[in-house]
Each structure stands twice: as structure tokens, then as C-alpha cells.
Amino acid sequence: MMVLKDILYRVTINAVVGSTGIGINAVDFDSRKISDGHLFVAIRGHIADGHHFIDVAIKNGALGVVCEVLPENLIDGITYVEVDNSSRALAIIGANYYGAPSENLKLVGVTGTNGKTTVASLLYQLFKKAGYKVGLLSTVKIMVDNTEYEATHTTPDSLTINRYLKAMNDVGVEFCFMEVSSHGIHQCRTEGLHFEGGIFTNLSHDHLDYHNTFAEYRDVKKVFFDGLSEKAFALVNVDDKNGLVMLQNTKARKFTYALKGYADYKAQILENQFSGLLLKVNDSEVWTRLIGDFNAYNVLAIYATAELLGLEKVEVLRLVSELDNVSGRFQYLISDEKITAIIDYAHTPDALKNVLETINSIRTKNEELITVVGCGGDRDKTKRPKMGNIASALSTKVIFTSDNPRSEVPEDILNDIEKGVEPLNYKKTLTIVDRKQAIKTACQLARPNDIILIAGKGHETYQEIKGKRFDFDDYKIVKEFLKQIQK
Ligand SMILES: CC(=O)N[C@H]1[C@@H](OP(=O)(O)OP(=O)(O)OC[C@H]2O[C@@H](n3ccc(=O)[nH]c3=O)[C@H](O)[C@@H]2O)O[C@H](CO)[C@@H](O)[C@@H]1O[C@H](C)C(=O)N[C@@H](C)C(=O)N[C@H](CCC(=O)O)C(=O)O
Ligand SMILES: Nc1ncnc2c1ncn2[C@@H]1O[C@H](COP(=O)(O)OP(=O)(O)OP(=O)(O)O)[C@@H](O)[C@H]1O
Ligand SMILES: N[C@H](CCC[C@H](N)C(=O)O)C(=O)O
Ligand SMILES: [Mg+2]
């Protein structure tokens, strides 16, 4: 139980009707989850308007309502609080309700189009290896030190974030790494959090169905850096042309990293093979099992962050060399016969192209690159022929198969994908609807030193067909078919 007045601390309020001295049991923004003694926050959403559910919330037991427009009929005994922006108010309320948990640990946010999951997860791993209690909020999973929870979003809503941070406080977590998505920033999910630092990885065209223009998407990312305090650090990739934009108006201490240009943290790729990357980071050499150019950026960001958070340089270099693949992000295994299988979450044309180009830059011409890929059902159909085109152009063999068909007919999705294949690449392609059979076939076709890329589902542990979810794990399945794995 908490007094409403305390829950509203630091919320910018326009008007109050009723008493703020009442006790509140819980806070929610979904009328369906409201029961006796709760506070309901009405949010204007993309589909619905929470203001339409104020009555329902009160019927369900809400004692207080936070909203942008007061309802016409006010009910006696209910406290109404009018604010300019309910999403922002919710974030501050969430922090108050859970006791400002972000102030009791060192919270670092990672933003950018690609690499958020990789960087946040590897930082979690590195700090665990260094002996700390650590938290993680990521697309793949949520970790409260050693306890794992399912993630529904890349950046959860502000109440959920604060609830997990509080759970982290309860077990003595010292560092927490979280992904900060553009949707999250735009919907004020990270507002009111106390960040020790922010990392910017890169920016490319994405989510333009949500943010109208590229400039708008970029500026939303920048808002995150604008909100950091003087004590925080802002670490940006300056090989990306938007890196410096992120630093324009921040009060935070500014740090840069780069492979190409001048920066505070510099890295050079000395070797880039399927067994890993050899990097020169500032003046020291470091070996990592992670592969691909873009992981050189990720490793550099991790190195810099660990140093900025106070870890010893020598220790950081040792820990970096011990880091393991992130689930479903260029995750790989090498069989006894020296067949390399890579599992990657690339489920968009851009990501697929990026992954295939990276593999092609490492592999020698003698090896086959066999790609297994599909596209999800009930999602953007325009990406299908594009992905068909890219996969067949950049691989030596392709097996088109089902991703998550959801409610669609799998064969229809595959037809759309096949339409993108150039005639000269027809003979490279094969279609096998059943994903397990497709992976099996790729393993049978592969010869020593060949590479298999299984794209689209990454860390997912299910396949959704006709609305039903079945157990399915690309990594486990390929491991089964490519027996006697080296690592
Ligand atoms: C488009 C979008 O981002 N929507 C998010 C948003 O929902 P919304 O506020 O628009 O919801 P709405 O359905 O319009 O409802 C408005 C309000 O009415 C309330 N309501 C609704 C019905 C009812 O009966 N009673 C009631 O009170 C709702 O609880 C809500 O508060 O706020 C919700 C709570 O935080 C999110 O769960 C929801 O995420 C949806 C499910 C989603 O798919 N989001 C994706 C696009 C997303 O956020 N992705 C990013 C990362 C993407 C990436 O990097 O690839 C992420 O961070 O995960
Ligand atoms: N620094 C990077 N630059 C470019 N591509 C990257 C980088 N790091 C990872 N990738 C590739 O981009 C894809 C997404 O990586 P990751 O999941 O780490 O990013 P994310 O920002 O969390 O994405 P999402 O928004 O889908 O959660 C993967 O296919 C991965 O192989
Ligand atoms: N967040 C994305 C992930 C897609 C992953 C892919 N495996 C698919 O199911 O389409 C979506 O739900 O559209
Ligand atoms: Mg992610």
C-alpha cells in the first residue's frame, strides 16, 4: 500500500479532483488488470484509447485515475489526476511505486538499429564472469542475476522495467544492461530511469512503418542521449554518420569508438576467420570467438563500456576473450567434419544481406554457402521476394522453408519468396516446406569446410503454424544433424 501523493512525486500535474491522501495497492494501464484499490493510468495508444476504459477500470475497483482529459462525469470517492502526457506520468509513477530502483544499481542502455541484443547480452556475460550480480533486459530474455524470465518486448513498458529493476535491487544486482528501442523511447518507457551510461551502436533504415521519416527515427534515438545526466557517459560509434548527432545536446560525458575514424576507443581487425576475430583494441591485442566485422564494433563497445564502468583494462581484455556467442545472433558451431553452421535472427532483407555479406567476406571461394531461410506469415509481405532475391544471389545454394507461417498457408509464403529469385539463380534453389527437413537436407548437402546459414528464427524456441506453437529450436536441430560438435 502506498499513498497516492507519494506515487505522484515529480509527476507534472495539471489538475486534481479528489484526495491524493488515499492508499493505492497497485498501478496498471490496462483496465482488464485493474482490481480493488488500484490506480489506473489512461494512455492514448495506437489501437485504443485508454480514456475509453476509465469507467471499466473504476468498475473493476480503481480508486484513482491518471488521465490527459478528465471524464465528463466524475464519480464521488474516486481521485482524478490530469496530466499532459500519461505515458510520461506512468514512467515516473512506476519509478516511484517501485522505490526508484534504477538509482540503486548502475543501469546502462544500448540503443541503435542493430547490435543492441548482442552488446547488452555480452555485457551481461562479461560482468557475470567478472563476479558481479548482473541484470539484463533484452529481446531474447530478462535476467535478474541468475533467474531467467521471458521477454515480450525489446524494451518493456515502464512499469515492467521498474518491477524487474526492483527485483534486481532485492537480490543485490549491481549492474544492469538494457536494450532501449526506438519504440521504447518514443512511448516514454525509459523515462524517469537513472542511467549510468548510454551506448549508440548504429542507425539504418528500420521501423519506418512506425516513425514516419528517417530523421524522426534518428531524433527519437537522440532523445535518449539528451536525457542522460552530467554524471552519465554517452558512448557512440563515430564510424556511423549519426554517432556525433547523438552527442549534440547531451549533458553526459562524451566518449567515441570507431574502427575507421579517430576515436577515444579504437580497434583494428588483425584477423577475421570462422574461428574468431583478432583485434587490436587501443594498444592491446585481444582474441574473441565472435565472428564478423560488425562484431568488432560490438566487442569494442563492450570493452569501452567495461572500462568506463571501472573494470581494470587487463581484466576486461581477458574477459572479452572468454565471451561466448549470443543466442541466435551469429551463433555458430563447427562439426567434427568441419562444417560450420550459423544461426542468425536475420528476418529482414537488410539483416539477411548483412549476414550473407559478412559470411562471404570471411569464406574462401572453394566452400559452399548453403542458406536455409523463410519469411514469417501475417507480417510485411513485401520483404518476401526481396529476401528470396538476396538469399539466392549471395549464397551458393538456398533452401527456402517455413519460418513462422502463423495463420497463413506455408506454400503461399514460399511462392512469394520464390518470385524474387533471378532466373540465373533458379538452379541454386530448393523449396522444402518442413523446416526440420530443410535443415536436415542442408546438413546432408554440406561437405567439409562448407558453411550453413540458418536464418530468421535465431533464439526462438518455437514454430508457429496455424496459430499453434510447437517446440522448435534451429540451434538444437542443426546440432542433432551435425553430430560430434567441436565446440
Ligand atoms: C505499437 C506499439 O508499440 N504498441 C505498444 C503500446 O500499445 P498501445 O498503447 O498502442 O496499446 P493500445 O492497444 O492502443 O491500447 C491503448 C491503451 O488502452 C489500454 N486498454 C486497452 C484495451 C482495454 O480493454 N483496456 C485498456 O485499458 C491499453 O492497456 C493501453 O494502455 O504500449 C504497450 C504497452 O507498453 C505495448 O505492449 C505495445 O506493444 C505492441 C504489442 C508491439 O508490438 N510493440 C512493438 C512494435 C514494439 O514495441 N517493439 C519494440 C522493438 C522493435 C524492434 O526493435 O524490433 C520493443 O521495444 O519491443
Ligand atoms: N554492430 C552491428 N552492426 C550491424 N549488424 C549487427 C551488429 N551486431 C549484430 N548485427 C546483426 O544484426 C542483427 C541484429 O542483431 P541484434 O539482435 O544484436 O540487434 P538488435 O539491435 O537487438 O535488433 P532487434 O531490434 O531485432 O532486437 C543480427 O542479424 C546480427 O547478426
Ligand atoms: N519481431 C518480429 C520478429 C520476426 C521473426 C521471424 N522469425 C518471424 O516470425 O517472422 C515479428 O514478430 O515480426
Ligand atoms: Mg534486440
Image (spheres, rainbow, N blue to C red):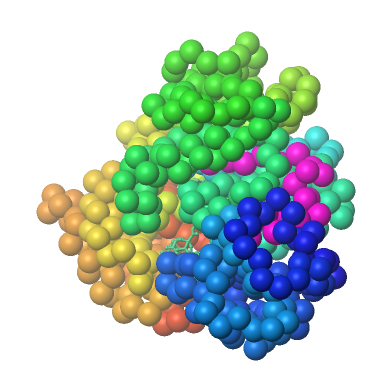
Let me know if residue 334 appears in the view: no
Where 191 falls versus 264 (above or below)? below
Residue 97 at x, y percent in the picture: 77, 60
- Taking the image in four quarters, ligand 3 sits in the one at bottom left
**Residue found 22% across the figure and 69% down from its top:** 415
Residue 69 at x, y percent in the picture: 52, 68
Q: Quadrant of residue 71?
A: bottom right
Residue 89 at x, y percent in the picture: 62, 58
Residue 478 at x, y percent in the picture: 52, 59
Q: Quadrant of residue 241?
A: top left
Q: Is residue 10 left or right of residue 275?
A: right
Q: Quadrant of the N terminus?
A: bottom right
Q: Is residue 3 left or right of residue 85?
A: right
The reply to whether the magenta stretch includes residue 101 is: yes
Q: Which residue occupies the foreground of this view, 250 or 468?
A: 250
Q: Which residue occupies the foreground of this view, 335 or 376?
A: 376
Where 294 falls versus 261 (above or below)? below
Q: Farthest residue to the bottom: give it.
A: 59
Q: Is residue 447 left or right of residue 316?
A: left
The reply to whether the magenta stretch includes residue 484 is: no
Q: Which residue occupies the foreground of this view, 191 or 349?
A: 191
Q: Farthest residue to the left: give it.
A: 423
Marks counted in the figure total 0
**Residue found 70% across the figure and 50% down from its top:** 10
Q: Quadrant of the C terminus?
A: top right
Q: Is residue 152 left or right of residue 394?
A: right
**Residue found 37% across the figure and 56% down from its top:** 210
Q: Which residue occupies the foreground of this view, 368 or 91?
A: 91
**Residue found 35% across the figure and 72% down from its top:** 378
Residues in magenta? Answer: 90-111
